[in-house]
Image: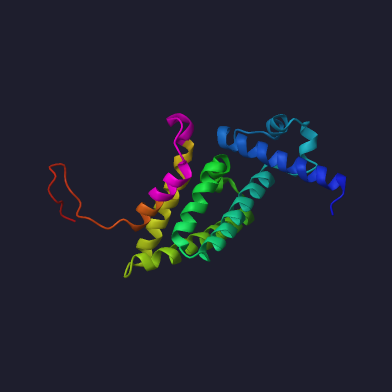
Amino acid sequence: MPSERESAKARRRSELLGAAAALFAAEGFHSTTLGAVAAEAGVSAPAVYRHFDSKHELLAELLIDVSERLLAGGLAAAAAPDPLHALCAAHARFAVSEAAIIRVQERELTSLEAAASHRVRSLQAEYVQLWVNALAPHLPGAEPAELGLRVHAALGLLNSTPHGLRRSGAVPDPEALLTQLSLAALTAQRAPLRGASGSAAVR
């Protein structure tokens, strides 16, 4: 069992990560200082250095953690009776409840240093492959490239939509709506493209 001191240290580290996520999402990684993170967390600037050596280390821990949690949730969803629905529902819950860290993940991946970037991209590739594997039975004969494109489009929808929830007002059960929308995007049947006149366009 952790000692009281160890528990307090873990809480402070978590508070600093939460403060960093909020500021990186609102102001951007490069515009945020460690002093600002300290102020957001209600501690002195030197206190940050007792937990993190640099701003890059803070970002790395945030993005590796979110990638690991998404992959763990994805592995659990992949074992469900309906893996595709479970993946969409799990990611929708995550995106709505942790919109700030999702925004940081979407926007600041290129700000990571090389080792952390490699780790995050590797975790993300595993996560996307879970989605591709779950989608494939719904689209017999679809090429891997198409499956991957559909998955990335659905994840883009899930990751970007929660940012607009505050602006658009209350939406009853946004998680359920996002789950339905992402499922529809993933499994949409191809239809002839239509031009401005409404006639079928040549493909």
Instruction: Look at 14% across and 51% down and name the residue there.
Output: 200
Observer-nearest residue: 98 or 173? 173
Q: How is the image coloured?
A: rainbow
Quadrant of the rendering where the N terminus is positioned: bottom right
Q: Is residue 127 above or below residue 102?
A: below
Measuring from the top left, give residue 56's x and y in whole percent: 66, 45
Q: Nearer the viewer, residue 54 or 2?
A: 2
Q: Kindly identify the residue that appears in the image at 53 percent across and 57 percent down.
A: 124
- Please state, as top left, top right, bottom left or bottom right, where the C terminus lies in the image: bottom left
**On the picture, is 103 further left or further right than 113?**
left
Q: Position of residue 93 (x, y in %)?
A: 53, 47
Kindly identify the residue that appears in the image at 36 percent across and 65 percent down: 138
Q: Tell whether position 75 is magenta.
A: no
Q: In the shown orientation, is residue 7 left or right of residue 70?
A: right
Most common SS among magenta residues = helix
Q: Is residue 39 left or right of residue 170?
A: right
In the drawing, does residue 69 fall left or right of residue 163?
right
Query: How many marks do you count on the picture?
Result: 0
Write down the region rendered in magenta: 164-181
Can you give x and y, in whole percent of width and height, for residue 87 in the image?
A: 49, 57
Q: Is residue 174 magenta?
A: yes
Q: Looking at the image, is 39 positioned above or below residue 194?
A: above
The x and y percentages for residue 176 are 45, 46
